[in-house]
Amino acid sequence: MNKHTLLKSGKFSLMVAITALLLSGCDSRYLVLNPQGPVAHEEYRLIVLSAILCAVVVIPVLAILVYIIYRYRDKPGNTAPYTPDWDDSKTLEIIWWGIPVIIIAILGFYTAKSTYALVKPPVTNAKPITIQVTSLDWKWLFQYPDQKIATVNYVEIPAGVPVQFELTSDAPMNSFWVPELGGQEYTMPGMAMRLWLQADKPGTYFGSGANFTGKGFAHMRFQVIAKPQSEFEAWAKQIKETAPALTKDGYQKLTQKGLADKMSFSSYPPGLFNEVIDKNGGKYMRHHMKNSHGSETETDHSKMDHSEMDHSEMDHSEMDHSEMDHSEMDMSHTDAHMSK
């Protein structure tokens, strides 16, 4: 292949790439770069900061590369100095080690600041709601403990209200992700993970599983529909009055591998979410969530301290659910472990 053919092929590839990029903007948005909630806005600022700091490094490096290739090219009459014995420069060492250290320090500071700022929802007069999420093969089940209703493959929330998602899985591990509202959180069998999100305004937001789970993974999508508080309450009331109930047998059918359409249920078996966790070996994971009287704190979610429900720092390296004998478990050791 000659030089002319290579040049022509390169121009064609570049045109295809540019065309694909432009056409992609006709049908969809770059969801991660379209924040619609306080969590997404904070993460967006981190993305922009990271891009700027990367550009501070990448652009000068590429410019220096071009300069060096041109200045020190092998060409008759090139007057570039030839110094074969040069092997060290304290000034250059300080520059190419100092700049990355400064960049990492800046990124680390703002990342830690944003992480701690997002432990709890911002101060608001709106009462938070709780939604329990269970990932299945290959569908999503959403339970509303306060409204006592459930949905499949879609979830409605009040706009401007913090939503505490409690996440688990009754199938292989997955990842719950609503790009325009915030980052993803894993759903794991035997675990109750936590993720709070909020939509600033009414709208329909794309949600998806972000962890490969087999044949139907590509279809594990759901809609997050944010509505004004009054419309959300009217919707919940309508579901309560008109939709069928989700029975134990109905849930077992949902757990079977396969795709499902959107569904709504006026009720579901009490304690279903916790039963799913316990079934997958996670009973001890909820022990620390009991109140001082020893009863499960499942009824009043609005009074729960979300900072106590953050499991992201827990050490699970020694927890093999398949081999653990719960009857011989030392609960005092578990309490000490969970308090870390």
Image: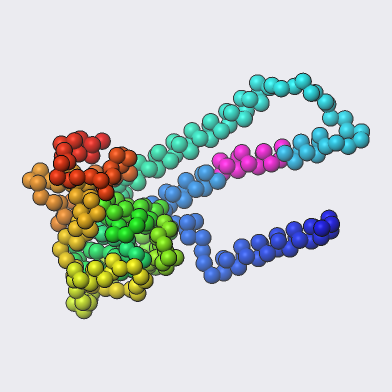
- Magenta span: 52-64
Q: Residue 76 placed where, x, y %?
A: 92, 35
Q: Residue at x 75, y 41 (%)?
A: 66
Asked whether 231 or 276 is in front, the reply is: 276
Q: Residue 234 placed where, x, y %?
A: 24, 73
Q: Is residue 154 left or right of residue 111?
A: left
Asked whether 44 or 287 is in front, the reply is: 287
Q: Residue 4 placed where, x, y %?
A: 84, 58
Question: Which residue is most to the left?
Answer: 293
On the image, which quarter does residue 318 sit in?
top left
Q: Residue at x 67, y 38 (%)?
A: 61
Quadrant in the picture for the C terminus: top left
Q: Residue at x 58, y 31 (%)?
A: 99
Q: Residue 307 placed where, x, y %?
A: 26, 44
On the image, which quarter does residue 215 sit in?
bottom left
Asked whether 142 or 182 is in front, the reply is: 142
Question: Which residue is most to the bottom?
Answer: 242
Q: Is residue 87 left or right of residue 109?
A: right
**Residue 57 covered by magenta stretch:** yes
| 175 up-or-down from 253: above or below | above
**Residue 24 covered by magenta stretch:** no
